[in-house]
Amino acid sequence: MKKLFLLSFFVLFSITLFAQTDTGIGVGWEQIRKKQHMKDSVRFEKAPTFAAGASITGVALKDTSLYESNIKLTLAALGSDIIAETVACNLTQATNASTDMADGTCVYQAIYIREADSITGVRVMMCEAGDVLGNNFNGAALYTYSAGVITQVAISANSEAFWEVANAESNIPFTKQAGNKRYYATPGLYYIGYLLNYDTQAAIPEIACITLTAAVATEYFAVTVASQTALGTPVTLSGCTGSTTGRWCALYK
């Protein structure tokens, strides 16, 4: 009986000592406490990811230069209301070049929304102000994307004044959509479309841009359709012309 008591005491003492050891093979209470402390005080950041199947004609978004979350976070910290920028063309890239807007040419550009948000409208960076007598339609719209087809879900008013801004951002707000001027967008791939139309012009408006590679152009990140009087819907991207010009556009709150 005495031997059994001593054996039990020795076993209990060994277990207690082992549980308090930081260098033991197992995990003692002190190690558990330390691990819990680390969990509470250290924050791990996960790299941005895109939903499965988020691609344009088979090109996965994660394989393109879309990791612009740091730019967006910086803009937000500085007070910007930008929600998302066009694919493969952010504002810091498009500050040294511009391109003329073409009469009657619809421009459609991919944009990825990472988090659900309410959108007030489209923003473009005008480098040279236009001076035109507008006709037909002048404005911008937002499109959803599915299987190579984009469908309009929000559109602005018709006004050539959107293009009469020099060296500044031009806001193009949506008109009332289903009783609400703001469009609520869930995460996913969208397109921005815009169009200039005029009878006469004294100055052609210019928009900030970058040059895209030919490979990107063939994957419908930016496409155009000439000889249009209105923004189309639905639009089949394979019927559009791929563009190597990436115009900077954004969505804002």
Image: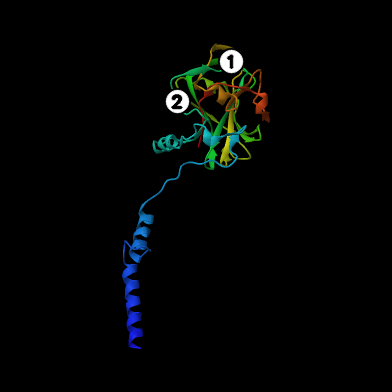
- Disc number placed over residue 93 in the picture, else none: 2
Residue at figure coordinates x 63%, y 35% from the top left: 145
Q: Earlier in the sequence, mark 2 or mark 1?
A: 2
Residue at figure coordinates x 57%, y 28% from the top left: 221
* Residue found farthest to the front: 3
Residue 138: quarter of image: top right
Q: Nearer the viewer, residue 25 or 67?
A: 25
The answer to whether 145 is drawn above or below residue 216 in the figure is: below
Residue 110: quarter of image: top right
Image quarter in which the N terminus is found: bottom left
Residue 187 is situated, as x and y percent measured from the top left of the image, at 56, 41
Please, what secondary structure does the residue beneath circle 1 have? strand
Alpha-carbon distance for marks 2 and 1? 31 Å
Residue at figure coordinates x 37%, y 59% from the top left: 36
Residue 16 is situated, as x and y percent measured from the top left of the image, at 33, 72
Please, what secondary structure does the residue beneath circle 2 have? loop
Q: Estimate how packed mark 1 is, as few (under 14), some (14 to 19) or many (20 or more) residues with alpha carbons within 10 Å.
A: few
Residue 232 is situated, as x and y percent measured from the top left of the image, at 66, 27
- Disc number placed over residue 201 in the picture, else none: none
